[in-house]
Each structure stands twice: as structure tokens, then as C-alpha cells.
Image: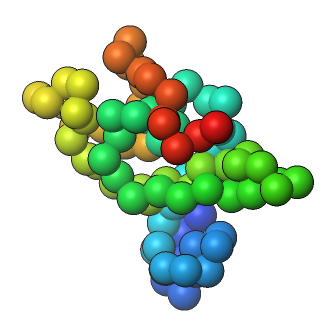
Amino acid sequence: MHIHFDQTCEAPERSKTMAAYGTFRVTDKKCATCNYYQGARRFGMQANKPYYVYAAAGTTPCLANPNRKVTANSRCLSWQKWVSIP
């Protein structure tokens, strides 16, 4: 995982700006690639296929475990593949 900090940093697809975000492969079983994750995220493409997930830094509630706050780098046994990842 890579964390990038830059106040003028634009998100990889240049559609929105994020001050800090993590980069994850779509095959990683972490919250950033989970269907229950509620944080801001988007795809990075390689060879016209989703290859990376760029997820905003910070905590967010988990839909699978409502009493738990998670980061994009967190893991749990409730992980399910994000439906947007083919």
C-alpha cells in the first residue's frame, strides 16, 4: 500500500481532488476493495481493466460491522468483493 500526501494532489483520474489516499490492487482483500466499505474510492486502469483502487484516507463506518470504524487498509472476516470490480 502507498499513502500519498499532497495538498495540491489530484486523484489519479483527475476528476476530483483528494488530499490523502491509499493505492490498493483490486485483488487485495482489504476494506478498500470490499463491498461494505463506505469511503470515497475510484478505479485506476491498466490495459483497459481495473487494476488499482484509490481510496481516501480516514475512517468510515463498516456496513457489515456497524459498531466498527475502518480505514481503507483494514481487514475483517466479512470481506466481500466490491461489486464494481469485474
The residue at the point 25 percent across, 35 percent down is: 62
Horizontal side of 60 relative to 84 (left or right) equals: left
Could you tell me if residue 10 is visible in this image?
yes
The residue at the point 61 percent across, 80 percent down is: 14
Query: What x and y, as percent, mark residue 64?
Result: 24, 25
Quadrant containing the C terminus is: top right
Please name whichever residue, 65 or 83, is drawn nearer the observer in this view of the structure: 83
Applied colour scheme: rainbow
Please name whichever residue, 28 or 81, is drawn nearer the observer in this view of the structure: 81
51 w.r.t. 9: above or below: above
Q: Residue furthest top?
A: 77
The residue at the point 59 percent across, 64 percent down is: 4
Query: What x and y, as percent, mark residue 26?
Result: 65, 38
Query: What x and y, as percent, mark residue 83?
Result: 48, 36
The residue at the point 14 percent across, 30 percent down is: 66
7 w.r.t. 67: above or below: below
Query: What x and y, as percent, mark residue 17?
Result: 49, 80
Quarter of the image where one finds residue 67 = top left
45 w.r.t. 77: above or below: below
Please name whichever residue, 72 or 86, is drawn nearer the observer in this view of the structure: 86
Could you tell me if residue 73 is visible in this image?
no
Q: How many marks?
A: 0
Q: Residue furthest bottom?
A: 8
